[in-house]
Amino acid sequence: MADITRCTAGDWVEVERVLLEPVDRSTNLPEDTAAQPLMVWVKGFALTDAALGDELSLETMTGRTVSGRLSAINPGYFHTFGRPAPELTHVGRDLRARVAAYRASAPAKAGE
Amino acid sequence: MANRTEAILARKGEIMRRALGMDYSQFERSPIAFDYDGMMAAHGYSLQDIVGIQRAGGVGQTPLLELRNLTDLVRSYSEPGHGARIFVKDEAANMAGSFKDRRASVSIHVAKEKGYAGVIAATSGNYGAAVSSQAARAGLACIIVQEAFDSRHVGQPEIVEKSRICEAFGAEVVQLSVGPELFSHMLELLDETGYLAASLYSAFGVSGIETLGWELAEEMTAVTGAPPTHVIVTHAGGGNTTGTARGLKRAGARTEIVSASVDLSGLHMASDADFNRKSFTTGHTGFGVPFATWPDRADVPRNAARALRYMDRYLTVSQGEVFYVTEAMAKLEGLERGPSGNTAMAAAMSLARDLPTDATVVVQETEYTGAGKHHWAQLNFARENGVEVRAGDPTENVPGKSIIIPERPEQIRARDFDLGKIRRSYVRNALAHAGEGYVPTTDDIEFLAADTNSTPAAVEEIIAALKAT
């Protein structure tokens, strides 16, 4: 399915905009942060039809009207667990064996 | 001319007076001292009232579990006669998956009682989920302001998950790139909406955690015949240590309070470049140290979370040690929980090893886990962001550059952070905020002694040493 590039009024969308240009930011920032604008992203229901990148207003879950560039339409969540860390895969096997060995050698005090 | 951030910060007092639901000025005694106990009691709720509020909200009464396999593992390499019993309070069993539900429940109750239409909190952590969930139950609107992405729009998997869960509970999530102006934007939103500021650091929030300390004292007494000898608390902003310790005291327990944080020394918390080079978003020294040395840096006039008042020890552990313990907990105890909440668990394994077998160590929280909010996701993300991940000696770790996963449990060794150093910093900060030339009164000295869990004589000594330099 081709990526959707236009939204219709009423769609669940996200807008992005510059909240603070570098000149409007806190004066007490490390250099790398101070050089960047402060960006904001907000989701809500589109108030008009628009294409990605167009200026758009939306209504948020609390009923606020927020404007910005249309940055996503029906935005999803794609975070995962990923692959097991190879440095950790042995941990369960090794530690179960150690607990079993300890209990076999010291049954009187183990598992109190 | 003031820029936009300075202009809104200049109106902080006026906006917060309306948004906090409480007048803080009545507790001030001097430029240094204030009536802490009076502030904590001002809401008028007894502990039993709060238990009632929390039961109605589906919060609290979480299982206390003894970790027999982990205890025997620690005993297998402890000196003879050593290896304390390890327990955990499974706070992930709360409605939104962490102890933060206790903190949110009282603020939401107050918002409802006082007729606010909604609540706002600035947090990238579990607190956002807690406020969103409690607000949904109470029928209140909710805005969560999160520091979510670096300037490339890349977010930690753990924070992306926290955005998701807040939206799942119907909150409006305002996601920002890196920067402390998160708080000035929160002020703008409070000004625009008239909602209650559900601050993490209000007396409402911190009082809500007291039930946790109370419950675990009662439950441990039922299981072992006495309150725990030691409680370990994952420490960031200070509320967890403060509330838990206050609850234990209310139950009459004489428990040693040990705070624990992940060591992220060397990383700048407001740096765009460092933002995605840390694998913990809370429970770390980047919050733990500054909030212990100056709690009133918070978004309320006086912070109810004053960890230094209650800490007996402060331990740090490395990121790799916590990830190892998170894996071990799942495999040995059938408890798969989020990594940040296991910070205290890593410290507990180290502490229990040095204590006699009849000592009892309670890790007072767990947090939920899931996609993104998981040690594998965080390690994969670290690798993608150029952080070296390898097995080896965890003392070789360099926050932001390398994560060293222990090869054996014996390598897990928490390090003591010098509380004397934290006390000196705190007193220096208190004097600096009081203004040049201010001479502390006897009342101030007594306040500083209580606030640093120390003595008037020790405070006088610190002040004398500061004057000499």
Image (tube, rainbow, N blue to C red):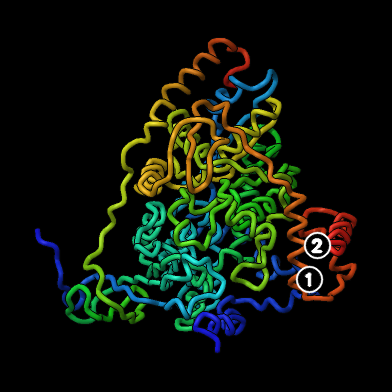
Chain designation of label 2 = B
Quadrant in which residue B239 is drawn: bottom right
Is residue A55 in view?
yes
**Place of residue B107 in the rendered image (x, y in percent of width and height, measured from the top left):** 55, 67
Q: Is residue A70 above or below residue B280?
A: below
What mark, if any, has residue B448 been given in the picture?
Answer: 2
Quadrant in which residue B230 is drawn: top right
**Residue B407 vs residue B398, the one in the foreground:** B398
Question: Which amino acid, by three-letter code, is at mark 1?
Answer: Ile
Question: What residue lies at 43% left-to-right and 29% top-to-bottom?
Answer: B331
Bin the neighbour count of mark 2 within 10 Å (Cα to Cα): few under 14, some 14-19, many 20 and up: many
Q: Is residue B73 above or below residue B320?
A: above
Q: Is residue A17 left or right of residue B92?
A: left
Question: What residue lies at 49% left-to-right and 63% top-to-bottom?
Answer: B123
Q: Tell me whether circle 2 and circle 1 mark residues in contact (CB < 8 Å).
A: yes
Q: Secondary structure at mark 2?
A: helix
- Seen as rendered, the residue at the extreme left is A1
Per the model, the C-alpha gap separating discs 2 and 1 is 8 Å
Chain designation of label 1 = B
Question: What residue lies at 45% left-to-right and 42% top-to-bottom?
Answer: B337
Quadrant in which the N terminus of chain B is drawn? bottom right
**Residue B92 vs residue B303, the one in the foreground:** B303
Q: Is residue B72 above or below residue B126?
A: above
Question: Which amino acid, by three-letter code, is at mark 2?
Answer: Leu
**Place of residue A112 in the rendered image (x, y in percent of width and height, measured from the top left):** 61, 22
Label 1, on which residue? B32
